[in-house]
Image: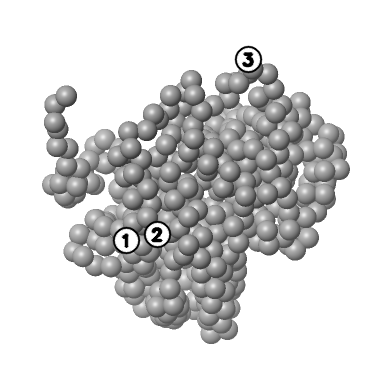
């Protein structure tokens, strides 16, 4: 065997300056145009914990964390060590005509954290977990229907997209999966109406909706669980973003005392290195799919139980426990909710701060003063939700904080940081938001930025 020395770090360094031209020619040119328009073309070259570093060495606080992937931060030494140990051990990975020891261990440890469930199916992503849940639910109940909510996000593959509550993602890809019923979130009357015909296999819901950081009412999830039991529908909690400690508990559903028939996990379970998705479920549903020896492979995913992914999941859970990461999310999240919420009394554009743990939404809305209202209306006419870019862009450029708007056309800025942020980071966040929101109430540079964004929006729609 030829001894090749493939130095990926050197390859990255030698061609890093070409990243935008490579993507323009070979990948998503529109994403390059977006990044250049809003000034995010700084060229990130290093990640460590909750921080990112650009090609000049400037440090940024990451409040996006890869859409919630980096719960324990980027490049955690314990997770890297676990993955190296797998590679060094020459394990018999993906034999297929065998079962995976590491998959068994990870399943055991996940179910110890969710003890009312019995079985695990592993996949490669959150979207794959959603697809598996659809299949298991239909097989378990013999029913075709799936109920989902407005503004829901469960992934972008075909079945998962059929449960997407945002038409921007659906448009152009229809017809989607049949027998999928959309209802309003937080509406138990609508849910009972959908379930009452007894044709619904599953109700799939995010305990906290990621698009907009929308929290349920105190009675909603428990009421939904009760209705699913009454109409013999499986209750499925999509904890792909809300789970693994994000909200200050291992699962967000624990805040409301629910015990779903299935729980979907992914994102943070990967440790930020190797994609992994998981469906935790009751034995009864699992056994309806794998009910005979000739159906032992009736559903699967080629790489779903690969040793690197399983090791990443095991190591992530170990780090979470040893470093009390979930407890830190609860503590720092409570502080940010309190201190950012206190700013609302100072600024008419800031309407509400909400969330659980380190899943936080900072919502803006139409001002009362005539001068600000006129500028707000210009932005809204050009593109709904455009005002939030007047918050996120200065946060990035002036304060070196990376965050995002909480969905298409949303007036909410979303905070989804690594769960390891500290008090110094909280000071940084509150100080930056205070400064940027204060500037947004002036008729200065921030509204000039808005004018530039309006011009781009109008050109894009022409």
Q: Is residue 448 above or below residue 195?
A: below
Asked if the residue under mark 1 is in contact with the one under mark 2, i.e. CB atoms within 8 Å, the reply is yes
Camera-side residue: 305 or 450? 305
| Residue placed under numbered mark 3 in the picture | 294
| Residue placed under numbered mark 2 in the picture | 73
Looking at marks 2 and 3 on the same chain, the residue that comes earlier in the sequence is marked by: 2
Which class describes the residues within 10 Å of circle 3: few (<14), some (14-19), or many (20+)? few
Which class describes the residues within 10 Å of circle 2: few (<14), some (14-19), or many (20+)? many
The residue drawn where x is 62% and y is 55% is 251
Asked if the residue under mark 3 is in contact with the one under mark 2, i.e. CB atoms within 8 Å, the reply is no
Q: Nearer the viewer, mark 3 or mark 1?
A: 3
Disc 2 versus disc 3: distance between alpha carbons?
Answer: 43 Å
Camera-side residue: 91 or 34? 91
The residue drawn where x is 18% and y is 64% is 56
Q: Position of residue 375 (x, y in %)?
A: 47, 71
Disc 2 versus disc 1: distance between alpha carbons?
Answer: 7 Å
Q: Position of residue 287 (x, y in %)?
A: 70, 28
Which class describes the residues within 10 Å of circle 1: few (<14), some (14-19), or many (20+)? few
| Residue placed under numbered mark 1 in the picture | 48
Q: Is residue 251 left or right of residue 92?
A: right
Q: Nearer the viewer, mark 2 or mark 3?
A: 3
Can see residue 153?
no
Looking at marks 3 and 1 on the same chain, the residue that comes earlier in the sequence is marked by: 1
Task: Report helix, strand or loop for mark 1.
Answer: strand
Q: Position of residue 393 (x, y in %)?
A: 37, 65
Camera-side residue: 102 or 6? 102
Furthest-bottom residue in view? 346
Q: Is residue 28 above or below residue 141?
A: below
């Amino acid at each position: 065997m030829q001894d090749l020395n493939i130095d990926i770090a050197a390859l990255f360094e030698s061609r890093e300056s070409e990243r935008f031209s490579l993507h323009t020619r070979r990948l998503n040119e529109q994403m390059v145009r977006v990044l250049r328009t809003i000034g995010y073309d700084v060229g990130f070259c290093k990640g460590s914990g909750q921080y990112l570093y650009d090609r000049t060495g400037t440090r940024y606080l990451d409040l996006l964390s890869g859409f919630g992937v980096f719960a324990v931060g980027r490049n955690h030494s314990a997770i890297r060590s676990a993955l190296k140990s797998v590679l060094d051990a020459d394990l018999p990975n993906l034999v297929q005509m065998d079962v995976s020891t590491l998959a068994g261990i990870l399943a055991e440890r996940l179910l110890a954290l969710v003890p009312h469930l019995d079985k695990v199916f592993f996949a490669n992503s959150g979207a794959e977990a959603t697809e598996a849940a659809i299949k298991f639910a239909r097989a378990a109940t013999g029913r075709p229907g799936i109920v989902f909510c407005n503004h829901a996000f469960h992934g972008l593959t075909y079945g998962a997209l059929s449960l997407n509550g945002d038409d921007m993602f659906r448009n152009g890809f229809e017809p989607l999966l049949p027998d999928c019923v959309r209802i309003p979130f937080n509406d138990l009357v609508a849910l009972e109406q959908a379930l009452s015909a007894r044709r619904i296999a599953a109700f799939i819901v995010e305990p906290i909706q990621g698009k907009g950081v929308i929290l349920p009412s105190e009675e909603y999830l428990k009421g939904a669980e009760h209705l699913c039991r009454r109409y013999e529908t499986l209750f499925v909690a999509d904890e792909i973003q809300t789970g693994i400690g994000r909200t200050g508990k291992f699962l967000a559903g624990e805040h409301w005392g629910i015990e779903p028939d299935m729980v979907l996990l992914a994102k943070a379970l990967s440790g930020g290195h190797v994609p992994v998705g998981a469906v935790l479920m009751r034995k009864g549903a699992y056994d309806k799919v794998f009910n005979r020896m000739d159906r032992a492979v009736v559903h699967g995913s080629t790489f779903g139980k690969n040793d690197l992914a399983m090791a990443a999941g095991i190591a992530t859970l170990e780090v979470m426990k040893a470093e009390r990461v979930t407890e830190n999310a609860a503590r720092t999240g409570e502080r940010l909710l309190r201190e950012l919420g206190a700013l609302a009394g100072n600024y008419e554009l800031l309407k509400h701060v909400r969330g659980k743990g380190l899943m936080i939404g900072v919502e803006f809305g139409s001002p009362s003063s005539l001068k600000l209202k006129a500028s707000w209306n210009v932005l809204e006419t050009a593109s709904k939700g455009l005002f939030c870019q007047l918050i996120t862009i200065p946060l990035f450029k002036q304060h070196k904080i990376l965050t995002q708007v909480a969905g298409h056309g949303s007036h909410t800025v979303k905070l989804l940081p690594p769960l390891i942020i500290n008090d110094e980071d909280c000071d940084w966040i509150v100080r930056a938001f205070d400064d940027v929101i204060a500037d947004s109430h002036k008729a200065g540079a921030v509204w000039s930025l808005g004018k530039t964004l309006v011009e781009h929006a109008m050109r894009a729609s022409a």
